[in-house]
Image (cartoon, rainbow, N blue to C red):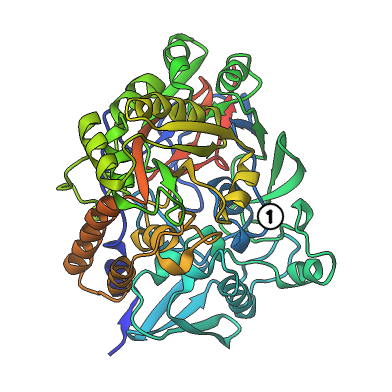
Amino acid sequence: MKKFLALTLALVMMLSMLAGCSSKKEEATTAATEAGGTTADNTTVATSGTENIRTDFIYGTMSDIVGFDPPDCNDSYSSEMFTYVYDRLFEFDENGEVQPMLVESYEQPSDTEFIFKLHEGVKYHNGDELKAADVVWSLNRANQNPKSKANFETVVEISEVSDYEFKIVTEKPFVPLLLNLAHSQTSILHKATVEAVEAGDGIFDETDLMGTGPMMVEYYKPNSELKFVRNENYWRGAPRATSMLRKVIPEASSLTIALEAGEIDYINELNSVDIARVMENPDLKTVEMASANVAYMGLNTTKAPFDNKLVRQALQYASNKESIVEVLYEGYGVPCNSVFPTVGVAYNDELEAYAYNIEKAKELLVEAGYPDGFEFEVVVSADIRSRAAQILQQDYQSVGITINIELMDFGAMLDYLSGKEHQAWIMSWSGATNPNYTLTQNFHTESGGATGNRGWFSNAEVDAMIEEARGEFDTEKRNQIYKDLQAKLMDESPWIPLLQQTYVAGMGKGVDGVIMYKTGSRYYHQAVVYED
């Protein structure tokens, strides 16, 4: 018996992270002035009776993108860009639930076979029509890239059925498939454009971004600016913003100064020490949202002393996470006791947290054979991560551990972490809406290195549990596996989860229509500015 769209969506949605949790305000919202209408993609945005509207939107960020080829990029900054330029077969809604995007409908004839039908008439930026052949080629290409192959675990066939239909067959039941098809690494590309690059020098740049998405890239200046312009012929209706300028300002306080000076319209994550000042500014406004990002320190488990679980556990006890939240983020966040954020049904709220306990840390170090401590290097790519490392640096001194902090450009840092020479690093993970992706990318043996498991963590029991959850259709049983995995990973401690931040976005008082999802996603293509 065939399992049709509604049944399959109901099943997959249960994987999604549904409930927000934070020490601050947590509702999904839009940065708005007055309640308003609905866009062509069914996203509610605000409108105003004011006629003086500026549609060239400018937002600031501290980090540049890393690359221009979706399967080759698993960082959030490049993913943000791909979200505007390319469409995917599925997408996540404001609750983190997966919904069809380029797919009009689909059926599941068996537990291992999916047949998808595409919307007809979807056009690439150059006017070419999207066909099933483009989808099949894009997915097969992504399946061959080591950085994106985790999206296709157990997939044995991706083939064309007709001009607007294609089929995916898996070796065994693979519940997270639709979630993975919403990831930016599975964006649907333009075959001729990509093949031309690969036939040439093989180096992708901003001129090679040919998609079906709502925006197109006009120009790119490394570590400075990325300019998008509106796709007037977007199949879901042209977005409100005629252009979006993404400005990179690496230093947090300088970013806030640019907002105050009117040089940018929006900052997704205000520097915590600047929040009060922005709130008091009559020309600005703020919106607080719980983040689904987990900031963590990762450890290379192939290198001594981090190949010893007792040492990793000692660092858990020696890390004053509450201090990081209070000192760096002015209380805008919660300490983490899991590799998952608190957002969702898969989070294990029964985990016993590692309390800040210097004496327990010392006991474990003695037991591990490091009574006098040791020295190691942690790499970071942003000022806020460097300051977090400095707090840990002070914490660890009391147990004889010395941290040396190395600041790198984000792209260079990712390249460095793809090898095995590093010892530790601090960054954040934002894959909250897909438990399987979070676990497979970061903790499965086969994902070691560039795919995402930068600590080269390998544990046969963890691998088996991840694989078991992929094929478990019973929601309750699957979520229990995820909860058991969190307990196992906290015991093994390849990560030291630090905090789940509460983002405070800052913007000009006239900013309207920034879409803010409770999962942490932000979208600017419907944003405009109402001016006095």
Residue 496 spot, x, y in % from top left: 35, 43
User: Is there any visible trace of residue 518 in the rendered image?
Assistant: no
Q: Is residue 213 above or below residue 290?
A: below
- The C terminus is located in which quarter? top right
Mark count: 1
User: Is there any visible trace of residue 454 in the rendered image?
Assistant: yes
Residue 273 spot, x, y in % from top left: 45, 16
Nearest the camera: 94 or 184?
184
Dividing the picture into quarters, in which one does residue 326 lie? top left
Side of 398 relative to 426 (left or right) = left
Side of 153 relative to 64 (left or right) = left
Nearest the camera: 348 or 279?
348
Mark 1 crowdedness (10 Å alpha carbons): few <14, some 14-19, many ≥20: some
Q: Which residue is mark 1?
A: 68
Amino acid type shown at disc 1:
Phe
Residue 172 spot, x, y in % from top left: 35, 84
Nearest the camera: 285 or 14?
14
Nearest the camera: 106 or 351?
351
- The N terminus is located in which quarter? bottom left
Q: Residue visible at 59% across and 32% down? A: 62
Residue 368 spot, x, y in % from top left: 29, 47
Q: Residue visible at 42% across and 56% down? A: 92
Q: Residue visible at 53% across and 28% down? A: 267
SS of the residue under disc 1: loop
Q: Residue visible at 48% across and 41% down? A: 427
Side of 262 relative to 280 (left or right) = right
